[in-house]
Image: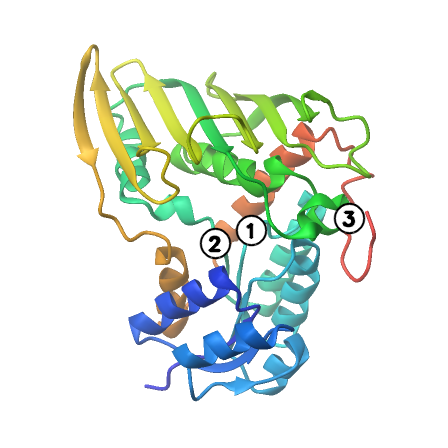
């Protein structure tokens, strides 16, 4: 059986890590690599010495890639994904899929029209702890879940300038980190309808004054669901937290609770526990090599012949919640592919 030929667009640390995870499955072949930085290309070629080095997404598609892995700045995701899909290539994209729900919907519509597999690297879904918590929630073990508390505080900020330009990033810590939190809550609860959303964005300890020229470094939000559940989230960059990171997702129900938390400030190690009253039971603990599982899952599904997955529609629902936290009106959350600057 012929393995799908994959093109890798952007091979910085994350792009290379996802490439390595896919190659380990044996399901795909690295056909071509594109990145503007020669040193990144050199590192990627060590992983895939037979891959062709090309210029940009057109070079990858011209090389006959069956799928494209996109790890580029956020402003490029929607346009590059659509271009790949319209050329008949499947897509695995870093988050966010789009800077707005309209951008995300345009990509999902393109995937549906092309009947090609589309997935986004919402990697925390693939931790063992979240997998177990979702099983508990879906089975009814926790009873009626009425409250969810989500936290992602990063003691550092991004080291690339484009993150701080809202035209390029779509937003600050909420777009970067909060997308994972919103996705985890809705995914775990099987995507109930969102009834109300309100949030607050800060920059340097003060309210964010102009989201068109600045990005937030602290965000809080409350999200109401049709089930009656209330989601509370907080995320930040450069928080004076005393550790590298504080990451947690807690689910509270009438029959029990469950939570995943990072260990000692780690970005990679997590424990998960099941709560009953004042008692707790460990349900997941390190080591857990979860970072590349989403990429590997897409590669295996693509090799198995999977086409458009209707679950991609959920990506738009997550983006729509972010739009509402940012206070975007539908006219503002327009499609910004092909050069839109805001």
Of the numbered discs 1 and 2, the one sitting upstream in the chain is: 1
Q: What residue did someone put label 2 on?
A: 121
> Is residue 340 left or right of 80 when viewed as pictured?
right
Q: Is residue 157 above or below residue 14?
A: above
Q: Please tell me in which quadrant of the rendered image residue 35 appears.
A: bottom right
Residue 89 in view, yes or no: no
Local SS, label 2: loop
- For the point 41% across and 80% down, the residue is 46
Contact, CB < 8 Å: mark 1 with mark 2? Answer: yes
Q: CA distance from mark 3 to mark 2?
A: 21 Å
User: Do the CB atoms of the residues marked 3 and 2 lie less than 8 Å apart?
Assistant: no
67 vs 72, nearest the viewer = 72
Which residue is most to the top?
Answer: 278
Task: Rate crowding at label 2 as few (under 14), some (14 to 19) or many (20 or more) other CA atoms within 10 Å.
Answer: many
Question: On the image, which quarter does residue 217 sit in?
Answer: top right
Label 1, residues with CA under 10 Å away: few <14, some 14-19, many ≥20: many
Q: Give the Cα distance between marks 1 and 2.
A: 6 Å
Q: Label 3: few (<14), some or many (≥20) within 10 Å? A: many
Residue 201 visible in this rendered orientation of the protein: yes
Distance from the alpha carbon under mark 3 to that under mark 1:
16 Å
Spot occupied by residue 151 in the image (x, y as percentages of width and height) = 46, 28
x 21%, y 39%: residue: 285
Residue 262 % position (x, y): 34, 34
What colour scheme does the image use? rainbow
Q: Position of residue 228 (x, y in %)?
A: 47, 16
Quarter containing the N terminus: bottom left
Circle 1 sits in a helix, a strand or a loop, which is it?
loop
Label whose residue precedes the other's in the sequence (3 or 1)? 1
Residue behind mark 1: 95
Q: Which residue is mark 3?
A: 167
In this rendering, is residue 67 above or below 243?
below
Whether residues under marks 3 and 1 lie with C-beta atoms below 8 angstroms apart, the answer is no
């Amino acid at each position: 059986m012929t393995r799908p030929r994959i093109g890798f667009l952007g091979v910085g640390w994350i792009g290379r890590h996802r490439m390595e995870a896919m190659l380990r499955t044996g399901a795909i072949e690295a056909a071509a690599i594109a990145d503007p930085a020669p040193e990144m290309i050199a590192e990627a070629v060590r992983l895939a010495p037979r891959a062709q080095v090309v210029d940009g997404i057109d070079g990858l598609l011209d090389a006959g890639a069956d799928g494209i892995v996109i790890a580029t700045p956020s402003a490029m995701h929607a346009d590059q994904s659509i271009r790949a899909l319209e050329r008949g290539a499947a897509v695995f994209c870093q988050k966010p899929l789009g800077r707005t729900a309209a951008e995300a919907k345009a990509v999902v519509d393109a995937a549906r029209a092309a009947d090609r597999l589309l997935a986004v690297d919402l990697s925390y879904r693939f931790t063992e702890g979240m997998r177990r918590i979702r099983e508990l929630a879906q089975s009814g073990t926790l009873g009626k879940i009425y409250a969810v508390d989500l936290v992602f505080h990063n003691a550092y900020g991004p080291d690339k300038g484009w993150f701080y330009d809202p035209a390029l990033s779509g937003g600050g810590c909420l777009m970067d980190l909060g997308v994972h939190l919103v996705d985890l809550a809705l995914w775990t609860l099987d995507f109930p309808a969102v009834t109300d959303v309100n949030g607050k964005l800060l920059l340097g300890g003060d309210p964010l004054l102009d989201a068109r020229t600045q990005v937030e470094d602290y965000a809080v939000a409350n999200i109401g669901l049709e089930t009656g559940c209330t989601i509370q989230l907080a995320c930040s960059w450069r928080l004076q937290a005393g550790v590298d990171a504080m990451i947690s997702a807690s689910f509270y129900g009438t029959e029990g609770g469950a939570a995943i938390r990072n260990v000692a400030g780690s970005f990679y190690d997590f424990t998960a526990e099941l709560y009953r009253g004042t008692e707790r039971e460990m349900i997941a603990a390190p080591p857990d090599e979860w970072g590349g599982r989403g990429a590997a899952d897409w590669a295996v599904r693509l090799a198995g012949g999977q086409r458009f997955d209707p679950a991609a529609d959920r990506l738009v629902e997550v983006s729509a919640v972010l739009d509402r936290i940012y206070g975007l009106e539908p006219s503002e959350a327009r499609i910004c592919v092909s050069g839109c600057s805001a």
